[in-house]
């Protein structure tokens, strides 16, 4: 069996979809499935082509035994809608032009959405290469873009919803990253074959026993008895990260520190808010590679995971949850619905605070500061739970079984 992954995002970029897809490819390969990847020139998160890939220097490469083909992409640091659309659609066209020349008989093409527009290339390549289409949905776009007011143009939204329906109807298999996504699609497309393909974690890699020598605290000026609350990931609108800064303003305990690590469109605004509120215990750090991340998680105490208070996020499970729990770090979770049911109600792996409720967040931070013993026990609960339910090896083997049945 041979599969082509079609995705705009892939290593050496760092990020949730990049890691998830590469880890899945590696495990499918171990199950004797030949996986190749068609992706863009790496550019995330700085929105500029990585130096060694500039001028189309690397058109194909092998990463950890996976053949990766690279297509050109339009890049701009502008955050405007026109620049974003040019970015997306440039890869739609170049990925099709690159993919149509691949001299391989693929059984499946698995396309990662969002960006939804890549569905155009996926559908065209599916016909051209005579391969069945798997549409992998990690975010319900355009629904999320509409509800977050990221896209307000009615014509563009109608266009996007029509494209979404075309992609789903064309697919042999639709996979959803969360149970909420799966149920949403099933309710609208009841006759389609839809499977849950969750994110997960490599517990052999994210193992706290392997990272005892973390020097993260010393390098960043934190004391051994400081209580570190950590957010790592995209600094975007959906996360509502200003709640962390407003909570920090309310707290008087000088041993409590907040670390916000990552990049994204809201970063400058958040840093400006830090200085406006005169916050000495909020620290912004640059994103790090996958190899460095376990050392960071080993050193912190509690993983902060907020999202905006939207019904849309009832089915969301932010990927940063899995690595934190695998490293035995409890959650301070501001995500209601599916994530709360899994990791708070069932796993007992942290505390929940109401999204966008500063007072509730402050109360839960104080609880952790007054009950330090629960940090360790909740963290241990979390590793046990993700091992049982979100182990990457099991996720991949389940997908293999689905594909072989197809």
Image (tube, helix red, strand yellow):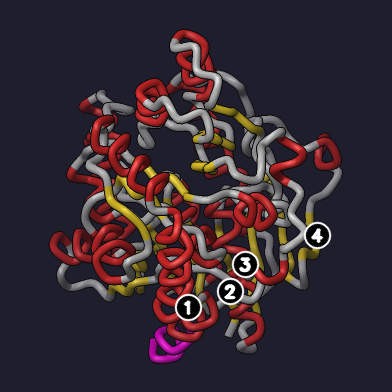
Instruction: Tell me which label, 2 or 4, sits earlier in the chain.
Output: 4
* Residue annotated with mark 3: 206
How would you rate the neighbour count of disc 3 (Cα within 10 Å): few for under 14, some for 14-19, many for 20 or more? many
Disc 4 vs disc 1: which is toward the camera?
A: 1
- Indicate the quadrant containing the N terminus: top left, top right, bottom left or bottom right: bottom right
* Quadrant housing residue 207: bottom right
Residues at marks 2 and 1 touching, judged by CB atoms closer than 8 Å: yes
* Residue annotated with mark 2: 203
Whether residue 116 can be seen here: no
Residues at marks 3 and 1 touching, judged by CB atoms closer than 8 Å: no
Relative to the observer, which residue lies in front, 38 or 226? 226
**Disc 2 from disc 3: Cα separation:** 5 Å
Q: Secondary structure at mark 1?
A: helix
Instruction: Tell me which label, 4 or 1, sits earlier in the chain.
Output: 4
Q: Secondary structure at mark 3?
A: loop
Point out the stretch of residues depicted in magenta. Answer: 400-406
The dot on residue 387 is 1
* Residue annotated with mark 4: 61
39 in relation to 258, above or below: below
Residues at marks 2 and 3 touching, judged by CB atoms closer than 8 Å: yes
**Disc 3 from disc 4: Cα separation:** 27 Å
* Quadrant housing residue 62: bottom right
Relative to the observer, which residue lies in front, 101 or 215? 215
């Amino acid at each position: 069996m041979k599969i082509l992954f079609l995705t705009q995002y892939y290593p050496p970029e760092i990020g949730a979809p990049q890691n998830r897809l590469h880890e899945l490819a590696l495990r499918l390969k171990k199950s004797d499935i030949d996986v190749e990847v068609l992706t863009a020139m790496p550019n995330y998160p700085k929105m500029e082509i990585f130096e060694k890939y500039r001028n189309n220097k690397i058109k194909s490469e092998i990463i950890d035994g996976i053949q990766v083909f690279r297509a050109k992409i339009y890049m701009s640091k502008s955050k405007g809608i026109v620049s974003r659309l040019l970015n997306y659609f440039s890869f739609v066209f170049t990925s099709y032009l690159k993919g149509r020349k691949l001299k391989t008989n693929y059984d499946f093409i698995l396309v990662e959405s969002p960006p939804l527009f890549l569905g155009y290339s996926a559908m065209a390549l599916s016909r051209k290469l005579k391969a069945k289409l798997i549409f992998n949905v990690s975010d319900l776009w355009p629904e999320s873009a509409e509800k977050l007011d990221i896209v307000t143009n009615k014509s563009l939204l109608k266009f996007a919803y029509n494209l979404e329906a075309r992609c789903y109807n064309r697919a042999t298999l639709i996979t959803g990253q969360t149970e909420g996504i799966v149920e949403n699609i099933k309710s609208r497309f009841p006759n389609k074959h839809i499977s849950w393909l969750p994110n997960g974690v490599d517990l052999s890699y994210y193992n706290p026993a392997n990272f005892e020598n973390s020097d993260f605290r010393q390098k960043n000026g934190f004391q051994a008895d400081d209580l570190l609350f950590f957010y790592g990931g995209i600094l975007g609108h959906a996360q509502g990260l200003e709640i962390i800064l407003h909570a920090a303003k309310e707290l008087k305990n000088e041993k409590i520190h907040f670390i916000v690590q990552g990049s994204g469109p809201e970063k400058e605004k958040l840093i400006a808010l830090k200085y406006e509120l005169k916050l000495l215990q909020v620290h912004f750090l640059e994103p790090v590679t996958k190899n460095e991340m376990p050392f960071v998680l080993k050193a912190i105490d509690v993983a902060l995971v907020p999202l905006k208070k939207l019904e849309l996020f009832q089915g969301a499970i932010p990927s940063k949850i899995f690595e934190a729990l695998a490293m035995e770090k409890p959650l301070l979770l501001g995500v209601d619905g599916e994530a709360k049911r899994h990791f708070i109600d069932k796993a007992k792996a942290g505390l929940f605070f109401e999204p966008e409720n500063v007072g509730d967040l402050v109360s839960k931070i104080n609880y952790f500061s007054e009950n330090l013993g629960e940090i360790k026990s909740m963290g241990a609960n979390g590793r046990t739970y993700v091992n049982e339910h979100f182990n990457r090896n099991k996720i991949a083997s389940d997908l293999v079984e689905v594909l072989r049945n197809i």
